[in-house]
């Protein structure tokens, strides 16, 4: 009886903690925009439309956005021997060469077992993590790993969100934007998935261990991503500060006076004026001297 009461009390506390997590996620806002309920453009995790996320077949373990506009993106990876991948959204496309990062076997390029290769489509603002072969497990297992040609015809759907895009350059291109993305961190959301967790029975408590572990892993990953984004913004601020300083220096060279040159010109003009005055005084003095002799 005491054990049952203890489980009931623990489950009641767990329920209150889940509710508090939801409250914090809902109340955390900036400029009337919710931050922890999904912020910025995100990659749809519906495997029917974002087929590239099926990591057991493609090797894609993570997708990071950095200024990528919303829309459907399709991979072209037909040649399994060129170690190249093309990604486009119908307006822009980019081809990158993964050859230096891939191993080669009899079938072609492949990510080494247990390692990860970063595919950076910087013009589009999309970065992929491509894993090598490994045992299945964790929240996003990869079994086969990436092999050249694995992504041919696969797609990514990026859905638009509120806020998230920071303009850090002068042009309307992906390289002049930084996309800050925060997933839905509410406890009952799809990422944390704690809404159906119960600790009221022995069996449900055992089942909850895996769900809670994945939720902790999600929080740790999002915190790491936010820390990385914060560091990146600090470097971006420093870079923009240097650019502003250089621009002001260039403007100063064009618009401001060169003090040394202007002082030299002023001194030269003073000498010329004083010399002219002295010559005029001497010229006026000669007739006066002549008149003095006639008196």
Image (cartoon, helix red, strand yellow):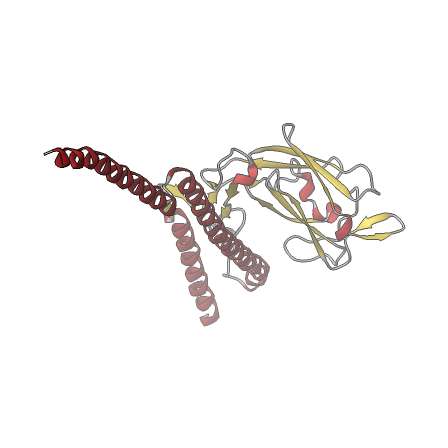
Q: Which residue lies furthest to the top in this view?
A: 90
Q: Where is residue 56 in the image (x, y as percent from the top left)?
A: 73, 49
Residue 282 appears left or right of 23: left
**Closest to the observer: 166 or 283?**
283
- Residue 184 vs residue 259, the one in the foreground: 259
Which residue: 72% across, 58% down?
115
Q: Which residue is drawn at 76% across and 49% down?
A: 146
Q: Residue 293: in sight, yes or no?
A: yes
- Residue 68 in sight from this viewpoint: no
Q: How many labels does the image show?
A: 0
Q: Residue at x 56, y 64 (%)?
A: 202
Residue that sits furthest to the left in the current view: 295
**Quadrant of the snapshot with the C terminus:** top left
- Horizontal placement of 93 versus 35: left or right? right
Q: In which quarter of the image is residue 254?
A: top left
Of residues 252 and 108, which is closer to you in this image? 252
Q: Position of residue 129 (x, y in %)?
A: 66, 50
Q: In which quarter of the image is residue 268?
A: top left
290 sits to left or right of 136:
left
């Amino acid at each position: 009886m005491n054990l049952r009461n203890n489980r009931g009390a623990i489950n009641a506390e767990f329920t209150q903690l889940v509710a508090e997590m939801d409250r914090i996620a809902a109340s955390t806002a900036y400029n009337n925009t919710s931050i922890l309920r999904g912020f910025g453009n995100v990659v749809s995790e519906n495997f029917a439309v974002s087929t590239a996320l099926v990591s057991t077949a493609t090797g894609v373990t993570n997708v990071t956005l950095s200024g990528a506009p919303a829309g459907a993106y399709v991979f072209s990876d037909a040649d399994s021997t060129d170690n190249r991948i093309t990604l486009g959204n119908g307006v822009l496309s980019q081809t990158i060469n993964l050859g230096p990062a891939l191993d080669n076997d009899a079938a072609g390029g492949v990510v080494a077992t247990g390692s990860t290769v970063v595919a950076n489509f910087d013009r589009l603002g999309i970065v992929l993590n491509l894993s090598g072969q490994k045992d299945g497990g964790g929240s996003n297992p990869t079994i086969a790993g990436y092999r050249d040609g694995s992504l041919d015809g696969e797609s990514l759907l990026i859905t638009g969100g509120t806020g998230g895009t920071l303009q850090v350059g002068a042009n309307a291109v992906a390289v002049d934007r930084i996309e800050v993305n925060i997933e839905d961190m509410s406890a009952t959301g799809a990422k944390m998935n704690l809404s159906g967790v119960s600790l009221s029975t022995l069996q449900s408590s055992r089942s909850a261990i895996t769900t809670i572990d994945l939720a902790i892993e999600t929080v740790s990953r999002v915190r790491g991503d936010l820390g990385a984004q914060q560091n990146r913004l600090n470097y971006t601020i420093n870079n923009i500060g240097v650019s502003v300083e250089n621009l002001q220096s260039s403007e100063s060279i064009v618009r401001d006076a060169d003090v040394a040159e202007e002082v030299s010109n002023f001194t030269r003009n003073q000498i010329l004026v004083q010399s002219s005055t002295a010559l005029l005084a001497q010229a006026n003095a000669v007739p006066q001297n002549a008149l003095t002799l006639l008196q």
